[in-house]
Amino acid sequence: MTHSVTVAILAGGQGRRFGGQDKGLVMVSGRPLIEHILEQVSSETSNIVINANRNQALYADYGYPVVEDILPDFQGPLAGFASLMQQLNCDFILTLPCDAPTVPVQYLARMKAAQEASNADIVVASDGQRLQPVHALIATRLLPSLKAFLEHGERKIDRWYAEHNMVSVDFSDQAEAFHNLNTEAQKQQHEAAQVSGPEVKKRHYFSNASDWLCGI
């Protein structure tokens, strides 16, 4: 059975470690981060939305729907998930953070294939060493469960995932795609790595393995 999937770029965070900047609009290599991501994702699908809690008009200029959190005060990725699941008419959302400038190659295809093979409720990408919980394919029918989880004050993604049938997809062949930019220094290092070439870029990514936990 083929399920409908909407790709959702999570740009709803506070960007605390980035001085409070809206990370999706931070300039990287001359363009806002969101443009790097949209360019790559749009090669697989045009069914894309952006989850944003500020600068919505700027995001809307890219031609895709913009969905705000249903909960106030920037309550994290799960709040974004719930907002998307509530407002979108699709079977699954495929999420990714706005602060990881590289999207895994065939991200949509590989995540969908894993879901279809396992009939899982949730599919989470792995870099080969750890799960990347904000890179996930999630059944929208889980919305009541997620709302109840949030209403109890819970915010930890892994705790909610553990309540459901979940499988992971090994993206260790392109682990560097999960490197996210949390600070100005990391942004500058990323830009320098892009200029310096693949070998320097590879060393840079693997020296920052502790930063691979994606967040918005």
Image: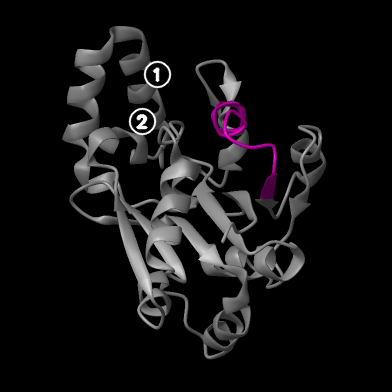
Q: Nearer the viewer, residue 164 or 176?
A: 164
Location of residue 201 with respect to 212 vertically, above or below: above
Q: Residue 134's image quarter? A: bottom left
Q: Nearer the viewer, residue 38 or 22?
A: 38
Q: Position of residue 158 (x, y in %)?
A: 36, 72
Location of residue 213 with respect to 29 vertically, above or below: below
Q: How is the image coloured?
A: one colour
Left or right position of 204 against 134: left
Q: Are discs 2 and 1 less than 8 Å apart at CB?
A: no
Could one spot residue 151 in this view of the protein? yes
Residue 20's mark?
none
Magenta highlight on residue 145: no
Specify the segment rendered in magenta.
35-50
Location of residue 174 with respect to 193 vertically, above or below: below
Which residue occupies the extreme front position in the image? 1
Left or right position of 149 against 57: left
Q: Position of residue 206 (x, y in %)?
A: 18, 33
User: How far is disc 2 from disc 1 in space, using C-alphas?
Assistant: 10 Å
| Residue positioned 41% across, 28% down in the render | 187
Mark 1 sits on what residue?
A: 191
The quarter of the rendered structure image containing the N terminus is: bottom right
Location of residue 212 with respect to 174 vertically, above or below: below
SS assignment at label 2: helix
First in sequence, mark 2 or 1: give its number.
Answer: 2
| Residue positioned 76% across, 65% down in the render | 87
Q: Residue 160's image quarter? A: bottom left
Q: Amino acid at mark 1?
A: Glu
Q: Nearer the viewer, residue 23 or 206?
A: 206
Mark 1 Cα shell of 10 Å, populated few (<14), some (14-19), many (≥20): some
SS assignment at label 1: helix
Could one spot residue 76 in this view of the protein? no
Mark 2 sits on what residue?
A: 185
